[in-house]
Amino acid sequence: MENGTAPGFNRRDLLTIIGLAAGSGAAYQAMTSLGLAAESSYKEPIQLSGAPKGASVLILGAGVAGMTAALELRKAGYSVKILEFNSRPGGRNWTVRGGDSYTELGGDTQTCGFDPGLYLNPGPWRIPHHHRGVLDYCRRLGVQLEPFIQLNHNAYLQSPRAFGGKPQRIRDVKIDFQGHVAELLAKTTSQGKLDAGVTKEDQEILLKALQHWGALDKNYAYTPVPASEFRGWDKPRGGGAGGRPTPSQPIALTDLLKSGLWAALENFFLYDYQTTMFQPVGGMDAIGKAFAREVGDLIRFNAKVVRIQQDDVKVTVSWEDAKSPGTVAQEVADWCICTIPLPVLAQIQLDAGPKLKSAMAAVPYASSVKIGLQFKRRFWEEDEAIFGGITFTDLPIEQIGYPQFGFNRGGKGVLLGAYQYDSPRAFEFTALPPAERVKRAVALGAKIHPQYEAEFENGFAMAWHRSPFTMGCAADWTEETLAEHYEDLCAFDNRLVLAGEHASYLPAWQEGAILSALNAVERLHRKALGQ
Amino acid sequence: MENGTAPGFNRRDLLTIIGLAAGSGAAYQAMTSLGLAAESSYKEPIQLSGAPKGASVLILGAGVAGMTAALELRKAGYSVKILEFNSRPGGRNWTVRGGDSYTELGGDTQTCGFDPGLYLNPGPWRIPHHHRGVLDYCRRLGVQLEPFIQLNHNAYLQSPRAFGGKPQRIRDVKIDFQGHVAELLAKTTSQGKLDAGVTKEDQEILLKALQHWGALDKNYAYTPVPASEFRGWDKPRGGGAGGRPTPSQPIALTDLLKSGLWAALENFFLYDYQTTMFQPVGGMDAIGKAFAREVGDLIRFNAKVVRIQQDDVKVTVSWEDAKSPGTVAQEVADWCICTIPLPVLAQIQLDAGPKLKSAMAAVPYASSVKIGLQFKRRFWEEDEAIFGGITFTDLPIEQIGYPQFGFNRGGKGVLLGAYQYDSPRAFEFTALPPAERVKRAVALGAKIHPQYEAEFENGFAMAWHRSPFTMGCAADWTEETLAEHYEDLCAFDNRLVLAGEHASYLPAWQEGAILSALNAVERLHRKALGQ
């Protein structure tokens, strides 16, 4: 779900429009407030010890934040319990496989029809190499990782408004944009029109650098030779007799600019999406399950929290069994770490001061839809040489994600057939019944991969605003709300503290959940020790 | 060994010097003649059938080319035999593991001391997604693939002449170069100094595009905000209280230009190195072994060819047992496909016309050294968050390659501690005894990773010019030699035809070996059928 931090292609379009309407610069202001590049402040495992004798902590939510807190607090000597609304651990850390059943708000139930070994990660699906907290818990808990390819040069950029709707290889757009930019700047430099701040010596090096970096020819022009060294050949290089290739023709600058496809390129430049990225082998829920192996004995599942009370010495949480509602039970503890997503927490009666309540109310949740589609064969690999990576489109499906394992082996496959994040399209799709979402994703995806119609087998559509356990996808902070409310949201309110991706500068990322949990745990420990 | 097509960092330096000495443009001419971007003309499995009754083909060499030819010819109905000098199949497709022993020309024997599960691919180590021939045989023969990360933003670029020798993260050089270029071009554009060929409308889109693509601020300047969205933060984004990050500071343009580190960036742009790349799980020799499962029964190992004779009806090849020299045996066949590397073939008495002989003499072989180093722990991952990818340096080791599997699991690891290709350094290292090569690689690598000294355990150093079975690494064509000799090298000489990476426009790549073999097989079949 980490795409909270990724201004996607459509969002970008929107920003371009903002930019054009509001004057240059407005777009970046908007982006900076929406997009939150995210890295980790995690250094090493925390080492807490010496909890006061008998001190207890009640944790609400057995997602990644709640289980991180539970693991570290128990190790430090606290008596820990977790209440979890769901019947499984992990929260948004979740993998859907054949046979899994899920009922969304509104009552629609889907039972996943994927073949064995195939899956959809409806929540988080990738881990940056700089998310050291996630990586460290993966290492400690024995979660095996494999690469997640964010940028696949052979996947597509597509827009109905560009090139007659014909998908373009990411390679062509990315390489040609760079080549044209290099040519334009090299010409300006040779003509002595460069900004006065660049010395003559630097200009000479710049020219040489642009020539290499942009694949320019001896006249500093971006032409088929040597551009084909970067963008590939029309007739590929062969072996044996007649092996000589023929160069390929770059896209003309004016076509490239007017296509708008360049707007998607930042998906490959943002810090959050830079190599090396990972996914757990077999599905993202390997992480949730690994945590649950450690702290599963502390979790009471199907426990729906209905009231959170606190006074100066204790916290009292009332809950009912989600499977047989009506009877309310209570848990009492010295402290409470609450990781319940804000839209759900807002519906629970809560003893808290006005600052925390204002902060809670100030943070909307991004909408998101993710749709998994099973096909009879991996035609994207067999027919189109697309192995992993993501196609970005401004069709309403926004993205097509290709499976990041089992490359080149043939057989069936599950695509991520749509990934909408924080866009009007996510709301449109959320409003549809699940089967209709799947149907639309297939119809739209067929505009990029015509093989869809013949090869489609079944699908599963997750709309996060219809999730009973989150009622949205992830916290949608802005620069303004961060400045006004972030510290209040994270501050202790008497004996209660919030944790989760929403209580971090890495919203929508598991790293945010872990860092906020560790930060809450450290502060709680100091308070408990009276420091 | 595919780096035959990659002007590496040092080679680049050399080219820069050529460029500066010979005037602008010379460098790219040189690069185009040296660097051969390589893709595949492979479409689908060839389907040959109906070999003339009793027709026989003798194949020399059980490398990838020879075994490809054998597999397809036997299927078409030919009687096939392979003579192989080595005692194993695969040729340069080779993986060295603990316990393996290897004696190079000059008599030095190394026995590899790697721990179980660790390995070095002394020959080819990566497969581009557009090498459809290799991928198709992998699929047909059941070779499992995993990603090979060429560009890891968190690996380093390093030069003793730049930044006081301090390694720079690839991210910083790559992102900052792009940002500065965007700023310079945006300023020129706003100032109306752009080339007349760009319309006013396109200039407006260009400005907007540069702002997004280069992470420029509202004034089109490359400044810490929003640049940190691409290049990361000084104080990373945190969770809980005090989570706000602080931006990072880009490298100044003049420092970046003078560093020369930009010269290594093309290693991430060249078509041959674009995502998605692969390696076989467990070692590159999975491919050679898979071929050998199919055609192993046709191979006579330890067979040293000493003479190749032909007349108008047959080919006669004399060979002796490499393990007990002295007795010469003969094989006779209707046709011969010879995949013996040219430096070895040049030493064998061969009945061939002057055109083929001239072509053979015109192609030198690139030198190359690859050194595997085992360390007690994967400090590059644990201390430096480098997971896979390659560090480029202009120290004599040229490259450090990080293992592309078992990420984040801890334990021991084997680095590619040097990868020299077609450079004076390769000859320098080749001249040293193996133990000395390893020692130098450790001493030099320690300038980038100081952990080397404490963590090093053992090493294995392959110098291809001392390989008895190739006497060099791979064919080193130029534009000039290609134009003059390529077709002659690939042409049938009576009943003999050459195949291998050297007989392709993808020298040093396994794809070249496969395509040349398939091309030879097709022509042979047509000839045999009298077409």
Image (cartoon, coloured by chain):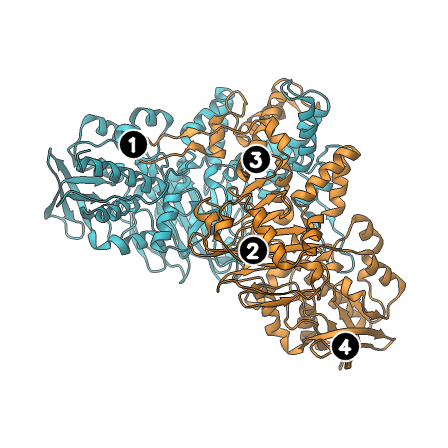
Chain colours: A orange, B cyan
Q: Amino acid at mark 4?
A: Trp
| Badge 2: residue crowd in 10 Å (few <14, some 14–19, many ≥20) | many
What percent of the width, then of the height, locates residue A435?
Answer: 61, 58
Q: Earlier in the sequence, mark 4 or mark 3?
A: 3
Closer to the camera, A403 or A107?
A: A107
Q: Which residue is identified by label 4?
A: A319
Q: Amino acid at mark 3?
A: Val
| Badge 3: residue crowd in 10 Å (few <14, some 14–19, many ≥20) | many
Q: Earlier in the sequence, mark 1 or mark 3?
A: 3
What percent of the width, then of the height, locates residue A430?
Answer: 69, 56
Quadrant containing the N terminus of chain B is top left
Q: Amino acid at mark 2?
A: Phe
Name the residue at 60% across, 21% down. Answer: A187
Q: Nearer the viewer, mark 2 or mark 4?
A: 4
Q: Which residue is identified by label 2?
A: A278
| Chain label for disc 2 | A
Q: Which residue is identified by label 3?
A: A173
Q: Which residue is identified by label 1?
A: A241
| Badge 4: residue crowd in 10 Å (few <14, some 14–19, many ≥20) | many
The residue tagged with tag 2: helix, strand or loop?
strand
Q: Earlier in the sequence, mark 2 or mark 1?
A: 1
What percent of the width, then of the height, locates residue B358?
Answer: 24, 27
